[in-house]
Image: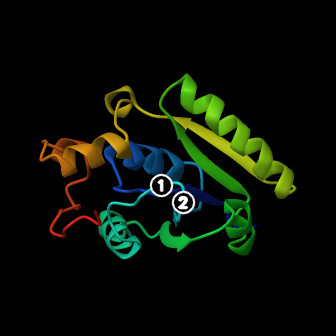
């Protein structure tokens, strides 16, 4: 029997408790969850890919089912290259669903047999987004309750 491999793509800039919630849910469904840090040309990143990778690896240091990788280009190609048949996306609200539904249809068109799995975030983290956390970090707000304890902002953001 082959492993059920899922990819959770995102920029994770930074990785939040909302992301953590989705990964923990995905681990109940899949044999391997690859957290794929994508380069999004439309976003200005606050932290380097290397720093984000380091943080996520620290969060899941004791979870052998989680792999962390980075990529640029199409998520569907990354999935194909990693033998993943599933893309996992977290949904906080109906706006997320409408946006993710469009992307899911394209990915399923590009990869025959690819399935998109939408997981609803826990209500306690449904208001958390990387954008909000980035703003808190930039403007010296209290961001620590929105990110896993393993993330220690000890580097100057890429501004």
**Residue at x 61% of width, y 30% of height:** 97
Number of labels in the image equals 2
Q: Which residue is mark 2?
A: 40
Residue 93: image location, x then y, percent: 50, 25
Q: Name the disc covering residue 153, or none.
A: none
Q: Which residue is mark 1?
A: 43
Vertical placement of 93 versus 83: above or below?
above
Q: Are marks 1 and 2 in contact (CB under 8 Å)?
A: yes
Residue 118: image location, x then y, percent: 61, 38
Q: Nearer the viewer, residue 134 or 119?
A: 134
Secondary structure, mark 2, is loop
Q: In the displayed structure, does residue 11 sit left or right of residue 87? A: left
Vertical placement of 68 versus 114: above or below?
below
Number of residues whose C-alpha sits closer than 10 Å to that of mark 1, classed few (under 14), some (14–19) or many (20 or more): few
Residue 84: image location, x then y, percent: 70, 64
Residue 77: image location, x then y, percent: 73, 67
**Residue at x 60% of width, y 49% of height:** 88
Q: Nearer the viewer, residue 35 or 154?
A: 154
């Amino acid at each position: 029997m082959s492993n059920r491999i899922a990819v959770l793509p995102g920029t994770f800039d930074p990785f939040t408790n909302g992301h953590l919630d989705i990964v923990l849910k995905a681990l109940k469904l899949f044999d391997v969850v690859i957290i794929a840090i994508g380069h999004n040309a439309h976003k200005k990143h606050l932290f380097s890919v290397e720093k984000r990778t380091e943080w996520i690896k620290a969060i899941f240091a004791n979870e052998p089912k989680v792999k962390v990788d980075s990529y640029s280009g199409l998520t569907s190609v990354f999935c194909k290259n990693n033998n993943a048949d599933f893309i996992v996306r977290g949904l906080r609200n109906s706006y997320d669903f409408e946006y993710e539904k469009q992307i899911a249809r394209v990915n399923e068109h590009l990869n025959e047999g690819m399935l998109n799995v939408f997981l609803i975030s826990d209500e306690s983290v449904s208001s958390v987004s990387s954008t909000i956390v980035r703003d808190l970090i930039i403007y010296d707000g209290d961001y620590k309750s929105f990110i896993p304890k393993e993330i220690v902002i000890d580097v100057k953001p890429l501004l």
